[in-house]
């Protein structure tokens, strides 16, 4: 077991090596990495982030009957929204700072499940991998392009560790249907995709004429604000950053695109092997400002030809008043009943529910988010194609079981860091275009933005706060 102090010291040396091209990040760390558990042994797990969404995934893991809960960690340990999980596991060790948890209890667990704000996914995941732990982390994998790159590198260097990103649709019907239809030639020659999230959930009502960050408020007595901030430069506490509101701020979250993109575009991106775009363009923004995400956005992602497949344009629409064009015969907009509820409000049915429209040379498909399956439109065409559709296999495990079985060496995770990381990078490029309200040209070979030097420097994000820089390659 490597201590956190040794990890940070070695990370600094490894980072210096990477900067000159040695490309040897976590290999430099002397690990006694987590071994594959034998059979269906219970996975000893530590939960980091135990309120709100954290509580939901903890309950999902509990339903598997495959975990032994060793430790609980939350910067709000003791607050009202963490009390339920604390009551569920009174014998689990409790921590406010994940770094102390690894230092003091790191030998006691095999895996971690992370349900914290987007800006803290990277340091926790990186420390977990360096400590030989299997990692489950909510999406998006990371907040910046560079963070996702480092996490993919770390995961590749430790194939003995299971990694899973929490886009549950990768273990549900849409995942298996998309692959079966693609293999059977039903989905082929995709040229364009419209992705849309136009529901109320996640929309704030702040003034887009904002010219400074919110005023300081008293830090709640149960909160470790310094650890909550993590890698981000110091901000005075304000309730507008907390309890899910962080998602709206560029400094902390990935906006609607980062929140919903992985639930809508995951199968399109993986099975069409889209990789990274060569162009990301802002087509429309409402409420653009320097601090938080706009009320509405239309973003165009352009992907090149690949392996005989034609170029693909993905157009993303978000905002209550920013509905995409709908093809004739679209029909009713479905809503996946399994979409989790949050403290930010439910995703109640609306004029157009979260989903996608996939255009090919011959067919048009519509689909929802998460595990929602695709259907062919219009209905007349669907009836004509009905006897040509292949049988779709059932999922052998849900997303949480899949992760735990991978910890035991029985299955492979379906949304590993190596798979999901590239999609996370696509979203980070989209966020940069939103923030700058501009068009970006990207060279996927060099992983550089070629038309905007300032934007290119943003790939790495703002330098981390003092004391947190060791998690990064400098």
Image (tube, rainbow, N blue to C red):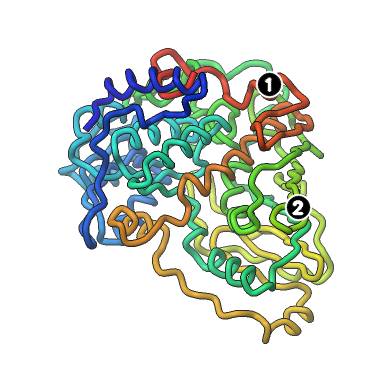
Q: Which residue is mark 2?
A: 312
From this viewpoint, which residue is outermost toward the front?
22
> Viewer-proximal residue, 223 or 429?
429
Residue most extreme to the right: 328
Upstream in sequence: badge 2 or badge 1? 1
The residue labelled by disc 1 is 210
- Position of residue 79 in the picture relative to residue 425 (left or right): left
Residue displayed at 33% across by 45% down: 134
What x and y, as percent, mark residue 209?
72, 23
Left or right of 470 in this view: 291: right
The mark total stands at 2
Quarter in which the N terminus is drawn: top left
Label 1's element? loop
**Looking at the picture, how far across and down is residue 44, in whole percent?**
22, 48
Residue 267, percent across and down? 59, 58
Quick check: marks 2 and 1 in contact, CB under 8 Å? no
Q: Nearer the viewer, mark 2 or mark 1?
A: 2
Does residue 65 appear in the picture of this structure?
yes
When the figure is inspected, residue 342 is found, relative to residue 309, above or below; the finding is above
Q: Secondary structure at mark 2?
A: strand
- Does residue 189 lie above or below 426 as drawn? below
């Amino acid at each position: 077991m490597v201590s956190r102090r040794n990890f940070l010291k070695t990370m600094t040396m490894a980072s210096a090596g990477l900067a000159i091209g040695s490309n040897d990040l976590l290999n430099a760390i002397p690990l006694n990495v987590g071994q594959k558990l034998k059979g269906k042994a219970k996975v000893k797990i530590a939960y980091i982030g135990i309120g709100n969404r954290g509580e939901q995934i903890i309950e999902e893991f509990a339903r598997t009957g495959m975990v032994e809960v060793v430790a609980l960690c939350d910067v709000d340990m003791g607050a009202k929204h963490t009390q339920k999980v604390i009551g569920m596991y009174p014998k689990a060790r409790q921590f406010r700072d994940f770094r102390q948890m690894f230092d003091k209890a790191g030998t006691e667990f095999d895996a971690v499940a992370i349900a914290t704000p987007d800006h803290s996914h990277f340091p926790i995941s990186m420390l977990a991998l360096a400590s030989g732990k299997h990692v489950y982390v909510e999406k998006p994998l990371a907040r910046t392009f560079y963070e996702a790159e480092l996490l993919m590198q770390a995961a590749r260097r430790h194939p003995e560790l299971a990694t899973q990103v929490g886009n549950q649709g990768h273990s549900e019907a849409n995942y298996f249907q998309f692959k079966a239809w693609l293999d059977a030639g039903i989905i082929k020659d995709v040229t364009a995709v419209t992705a849309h999230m136009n529901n109320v959930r996640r929309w704030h009502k702040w003034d887009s004429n904002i010219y400074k960050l919110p005023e300081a408020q008293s830090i709640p007595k149960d909160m470790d604000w310094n650890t909550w901030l993590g890698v981000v430069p110091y901000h005075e506490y304000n309730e507008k950053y907390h309890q899910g509101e962080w998602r709206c701020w560029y400094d902390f979250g990935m906006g609607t695109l980062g929140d919903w993109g992985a639930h809508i575009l995951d199968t399109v991106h993986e099975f069409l092997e889209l990789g990274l775009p060569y162009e990301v363009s802002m087509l429309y923004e409402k409420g653009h400002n320097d601090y938080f995400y706009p009320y509405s956005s239309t973003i165009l992602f352009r992907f090149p030809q690949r392996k005989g497949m034609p170029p693909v344009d993905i157009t993303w629409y978000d905002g209550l008043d920013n509905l995409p064009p709908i093809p004739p015969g679209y029909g009713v907009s479905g809503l996946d009943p399994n979409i989790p509820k949050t403290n930010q409000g439910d995703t109640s049915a609306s004029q157009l529910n979260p989903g996608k429209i996939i255009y090919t040379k011959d067919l048009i498909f519509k689909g929802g988010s998460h595990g929602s399956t695709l259907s062919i439109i219009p209905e007349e065409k669907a009836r004509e194609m009905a006897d040509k559709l292949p049988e779709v296999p059932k999922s052998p495990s849900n997303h949480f079981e899949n992760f735990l079985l991978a910890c035991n060496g029985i299955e492979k995770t379906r949304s590993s860091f190596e798979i999901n990381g590239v999609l996370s990078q696509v979203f980070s490029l989209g966020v940069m275009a939103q923030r700058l309200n501009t068009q970006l040209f990207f060279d996927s070979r060099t992983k550089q933005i070629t038309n905007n030097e300032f934007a290119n420097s943003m790939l790495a994000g703002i330098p981390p706060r003092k004391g947190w820089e060791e998690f990064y390659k400098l």
